[in-house]
Image (cartoon, rainbow, N blue to C red):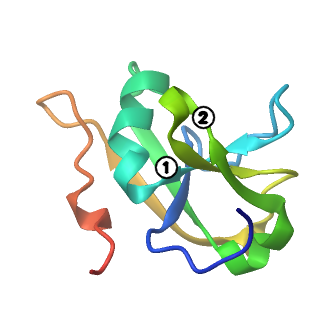
Amino acid sequence: MTGGGFAEAIWHITTDGVPARRGDEGFVHASFTSQLAGTLEVHYPAAASVVLLRLDPAALGERLVVEPSRDGALFPHVYGEIADGDVTGRVALARGGDGVFDLSGLADPA
């Protein structure tokens, strides 16, 4: 699946606010809002803070592909680099005293 029309926002997680370069798989990992908690738990267990980059599906166009990843769930992947024009917002989060990131402000509208 490519293109736009997604029910949830698409996020790329960084520790420094700079988009990662694509990995050996050929793409940059991203997550839908509902997947962020799991992605943070699996891939950022020791991070004290992160910066979430909200991605614009229309700007990404054909570079954005939704395909099976962790446990067969569909995840957004960006084939190519993430440019400044692909990012519509940044959210800095610090890990709370309970050891988790508060994602409640990121809920997508119903």
Q: Position of residue 84 (x, y in %)?
A: 76, 68
At label 2, which amino acid type do we have? Ser
For the point 49% across and 25% down, the residue is: 43
- The answer to whether residue 92 is above or below residue 16 is below
Quick check: can you spot residue 44? Answer: yes
Where disc 1 sits, the SS reads: strand
Residue at mark 1 to residue at mark 2: CA–CA distance: 22 Å
Q: Which residue is mark 2?
A: 69
Mark number displayed over residue 51? 1
For the point 60% across and 34% down, the residue is: 69
Q: Position of residue 57 (x, y in %)?
A: 67, 73
Dot 1 or dot 2: first in sequence order is: 1
Task: Find the residue positioned furthest to the left.
Answer: 98
Nearer-the-camera pick, 52 or 109? 109
- Residue 91 appears left or right of 93: right
- The answer to whether residue 79 is above or below residue 86 is above
- Residue 78 appears left or right of 4: right
